[in-house]
Image: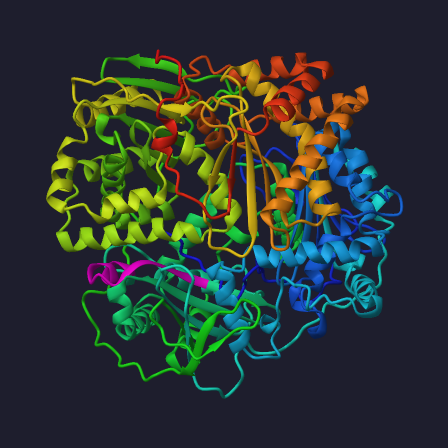
Amino acid sequence: MKRLVVVFVCLFCVAGAYSEATSFSPQSSSDSDIARSENDQSVYRHLTLPNTLQVLLVSDPDADKAAAALDVFVGSSHDPVRRQGLAHFLEHMLFLGTDKYPEPDEYQAFIGQHGGQHNAYTSFEHTNYFFDIDPAHFEPALDRFSRFFVAPLFNADYVEREKNAVHSEYKARIKDDYRRQMDVYSQVVNPAHPAAKFSVGNLDTLADEKGQLREDLLSFYKAHYSANRMALVVLAPQPLDQLEAMVRDRFANVPNHASQQPKHGKPLLEPGEPPKLVSVQPVREMRELSITFPLPAVDQYQREQPLGYLGNLIGHEGKGSLLWLLKNRGWAENLRAGQGISDTSGSSFSVTVGLTPEGYANWQQVLSLVFRQIDLVADEGISQWRFDEQGALANMQFRYMEQDDPVHRVSRLANRLHQYPYTEVLRGPYRMDLYDAGLIADMASRMTADNAMVLLAAPEVETNAATTLYQVPYKVEPLPKIQPVAATTDLSLPGKNPFIPERFSLKHPNKASEPGLAELLVKQPDYRLWHYADHFYRVPKAQLYVAVKTPAVEGVRHAAMMDLYLRAVEYSLNETSYEAALAGLRYGINRRPDGLGFMISGFDDKLSVLSAAVVEALLTTELTDERLELLRQELIRKWRNSTQDTPYIQLMREVGLLLNTTAWQPARLADELEKLDFSTFRQYVKTIFNGASLELLASGNLQVEEVKVLAQSLSEQLASGNPADWLPRGIARVAPGEKINAPMSIPHKDAGILRYYQGRDDSVAEAARFMFLRQLIKSPFFHELRTEQQLGYVVAAVDQGLERVPGFGLLVQSPSAPLSRLEQAIDQFLDSYAEQLAAMPAEEFERHRASILTGLTEKPKSLAEQSGRFWTSIDLRDYQFDMRQQLIVEVQNLTHAQMLEVYRNVVVAAGFSMQVDTSAGDFMSGSGLAKERDVYRLPEKM
């Protein structure tokens, strides 16, 4: 249900930005200058340091983590033509040592040992670096972070190694259809436009002839990494004065080269060129029609938001919309519309339609209907009331916004400081209050066939060329003349949104000092109701979770039919749910191991209305054979296409599919659906709620009596009155030393491996031990195999816990090393790490313990996150909601000697439980693996 699309942005994460990078606010701002949402209790201060670096300080006394981000106003668009990927390569190199902290893994190790995480990204015009950490260690972490922008080493020894990492990143996603489409786009846009460049980089573009690469790196850094093009955001529980002192002492030393922000000034498409049709052959079975319109720059129209307004109307999914019409004709599965690439020189708008096979056969008519919808919006859709409604919805979203993790907040805000005046850095994206009908009409008038580039992606397209980088088959030809369709009453513009909330009052107005717990409100044979009355987050929002426990998902055949049924329900709800989502009320529906479930989240005023619509759809959805066939084929394509996922994603997913007794591989689900007849399916649907019982959680701004009434109504409609036993859920046990091998025969040039280690039992104590093991291993494993040996871009120690059964995996994907080399490297690392662990100083061991505890004690940032935690606990039958506290106690009590013994017994003596890899071999199914094995079961229900 996405409305906004980013096209041409491949890895760009594009955002509009000011060309005047040297325009600054006063030296220091007061907190009251900055517009904020009603629930935001943070205190803010904006600074401009003597070197002209912008700083936003955020003091949040409730923050469990401290975080910082620095955004440099330079990205892949600024790469020299002869050094494409240089901005991205610099992002990699910056982490590998500074004058004060020369060791290449020092920063990463420090962050990891103190409960933190770190990352960075390179987009079209920005490079963004960020981290979070235990607040007690924020100042020394900030000291390390600051030196990246003062005196990085760019050690020559690591130039050669890290360009291999960049090349590995490029190769790891070489079969990603989005990147492949962007590769084709780069061939057909104006060669003088930055979108024609290759943003990732590889061994060819980063070739090091006579040591020139490091010189180019240093030149790029000096030219662009200047304080006047940087924005820093720090967030912590410490007072503002303390944060300001931390920042001034360190970041005032960042050099200011008075660097000017480059402006390329080139149009996206070459002037005078006729409109193009670009045909692309994808790796997956997918069909897509995308129309891109080059437009003037819009970054100066932040409050008018002309492209956001048009995207809302062209991409609407309600009754009478373009997508509604295309679905009714069997031509489309989805549609998105909105602003694409945008910089100081220009912008674009794109409409992308996910086509069915029949839609592909009629793509010219689909294209004609897109233009008809644009004409309809331009002729009848530009009106003050529609703009006001969109603006009111955006403002409502801002007023009652809940905070998310500190690290995401600072990264986002650092980027925005380049886009908005500091006073609007929080509100800017949500402000839509200057109606300009002429501006909107001007943008719409440019969305014509004469000003379009059309991309058609499908397995069936004819091609006559291939790109060099991703080897994508494609063809470019003039766009054929599209016959316009006559005005049709089938297309219409949306009316007023019926889901806009009218009441925002708090039903639990007294503020609590702690979130509190959910309580079991009703316990009946056919339903149980849990309730969390929110006195802590204090927003006019709520979440409703419903689990329908039913025998109707026993076995892979039933699971496949359940997925088809739920897809049909989603289809019937699309128009209703879309309008609800625009008004801040969303729903989700899914197959569960023991039945089906749905969730509704957002403003509570209309929650019961959407809940009633979902229940009605569950009980009454009936579709024609033709529509069911379209949905069946859509699901089969999705499942078959999963074999084209990046190898490491498939490896991580496969462990759970093999060991979970109520999960099945996508290929098996597709097989079952392919042989299904619809008469059998319709008989199955009639039995879904036989023996059903409900588990419910109502959380947030909801009173006891109203949730009781809601639960009673849901029970009367969905529960059978004669509940069956809940289906058993379980995880197959792998005996110590068994070492199962599960080759996946993944068709990818990269080799990949996941070594999975399963807990010896499903106790909280074992979960704590495995949590500690992964914490100890993850940083040295990454440093040795990724930084030192350069085996691949993807190297990680990953959490592989399944339900209550703890587990972790050692994951590597490599474009250069064979599987045998990866196996050898993991074995050698594990052997050598036993000695490192034995010799680990007590202080370092305690830092690891503190890091784990920092994560475990972190509080949910929002009502939605808190509700999700409660629901997870209920689902895992942690009815006292104390498993996290039990984990904390266990972690606090573990000793170095105990962890050394665990490592020797689990990792060295027993070895891995299962190896999943990309090699060729016989297919292994989860049901076959679970036969004649002990199975870990959840505790008995309350």
- In the depicted structure, whether residue 729 falls above or below residue 202: above
Between 433 and 554, the one nearer to me in the picture: 554
Left of 44 or right of it: where is 287?
A: left
Which residue is at 42% across, 30% downward? 659
- In the depicted structure, whether residue 800 falls above or below residue 338: above
Which residue is at 24% across, 43% downward? 672
Q: Residue 174, how many percent across, how many down?
A: 54, 60
- In the depicted structure, whether residue 911 falls above or below residue 298: above
Q: Residue 711, how many percent across, how many down?
A: 26, 23
Which residue is at 36% across, 25% downward? 698
Between 633 and 420, the one nearer to me in the picture: 633
The stretch in magenta equals 323-338
Q: Can residue 533 be seen in this view?
A: yes
Q: Residue 316, how many percent across, how many down?
A: 33, 57
> Which of the 4 image quadrants contains residue 266?
bottom right
Q: Does the magenta stretch include residue 756?
A: no
- In the depicted structure, whether residue 825 falls above or below residue 703: below
